[in-house]
Image: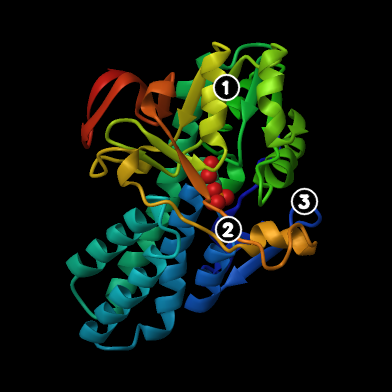
Amino acid sequence: MTIVEAVRWSAAGDALDIIDQRRLPAELVRRELRSLDDVCDAILTLSVRGAPAIGIAGAIGLVVALQSHAGATREEFLTAVSRMSTRIAALRPTAVNLPWAMERMRNVARCTAGDGHAVLDALRREATAILDEDRAMCRRIGENGLAFIGQGARVLTHCNAGALATGGIGTALAPVYLAAERGRDIHVFADETRPLLQGSRLTAWELLQAGIRVTVLADSMAASLMRERMVDLVIVGADRIAANGDAANKIGTYPLALAARHHGIPFFVAAPWSTVDVSTRSGNDIVIEHRHADELRAGFGSVTAPANVNVYNPAFDITPADLITAIITDRGVHIPPFAFVGDGHLAATQE
Ligand code: MRU
């Protein structure tokens, strides 16, 4: 099975190596990024995207951008770490993984003795750890969710929460990959995911690479598909999960959860533990990123609305916890009522 690597170190270890996801599915182009501006631009323009992948890209990107500062004094180097990590953390406000990864990197920098070279080495090890841990978390999410993806399962997903969104085999798609690996015949329905089409461009592409059956539909068709009894379960990723289980994910997730509830279809959220933000009490406290109006007015270079029309373009929505059947993380399957009260302390958790 071919599973793509969306984000990694370059072979020489001196650059952030990404698949440029803006070019998919037309062409598979890898890019090596070495400057802070290039890393920030790649995250902002969604060349690299998906909550875990942008956390990893931010961490590796910070290291590569700091390479030219290694000869500076310790003081100057730490100032550069602070300035660059603050800029990276603010690029996309909804996904917790970006500030989470930057906080990890800042802590390591603060706690490492020595000059710029010593701190840079420690940061390189930390960025590698963030990547390696994400790979392992994806696999554990897959194992924890595997029981829900039986032989012949028809799975509806939204956006892309697969390998392209992580350092490993994805979150929502991880159980799908493991089920397929075990010889189960799985059929994935991929919502197109307006307006940037992560479902039709990315999820469809990566599942085809892996030889998994996939059918694309426009977002507005999902409820009808459920009504036709063609969906056994819905599984999506998350950008941030609040302490009460409310989950932020790609815009269009919330209506899917509503439709699934109406039709009695289980609705799962799959995410690494790093996406659970216990300091955010509920979905009301999650900042939703609003993106440029031209994503709707000039989608993919075409004129898709009048150039001067007002546009409403939130990139994410909040699915209330009471619409979620279970949250699958690398730590287990968490069932309602959710009460994420602190690291490793969960109410209502089957582990
Ligand atoms: O704007 P994007 O493409 O970064 O949004 C991505 C999503 O909403 C994903 O579903 C989420 O990050 C989970 S990825 C494992």
| Quarter of the C terminus within the rendering | top left
Q: Residue at x 65, y 42 (%)?
A: 193
Examine the image and state in which quarter residue 156 appears.
Answer: top right
12, 144: nearer the viewer: 144
159, 81: nearer the viewer: 159
Of labels 1 and 3, the one closer to you: 1
Q: Report, in whole angstroms, how far the alpha carbon at label 1 lies from the one at label 3.
A: 29 Å
Q: Is residue 213 above or below residue 314?
A: above
Q: Report, in whole angstroms, how far the alpha carbon at label 2 lies from the one at label 3.
A: 14 Å
SS at circle 3? loop
Question: Could you classify mark 1 by the number of other residues whose Cα lies within 10 Å: few (under 14), some (14-19), or many (20 or more)?
Answer: some
SS at circle 1? helix
Question: Could you classify mark 2 by the number of other residues whose Cα lies within 10 Å: few (under 14), some (14-19), or many (20 or more)?
Answer: many
On residue 25, which mark appears?
A: 3
Q: Which residue is mark 1?
A: 259
Q: Amino acid at mark 3?
A: Pro
Residue 136 pos. (x, y %): 44, 38
Residue 320 pos. (x, y %): 40, 30
SS at circle 2? loop
Q: Residue at x 34, y 73 (%)?
A: 120
The answer to whether mark 2 and mark 3 are in CB contact below 8 A is no
On residue 200, which mark appears?
A: none
On residue 48, which mark appears?
A: 2
Q: Amino acid at mark 2?
A: Val
Position of 252 with respect to 25 (left or right) is left
Of labels 2 and 1, the one closer to you: 1
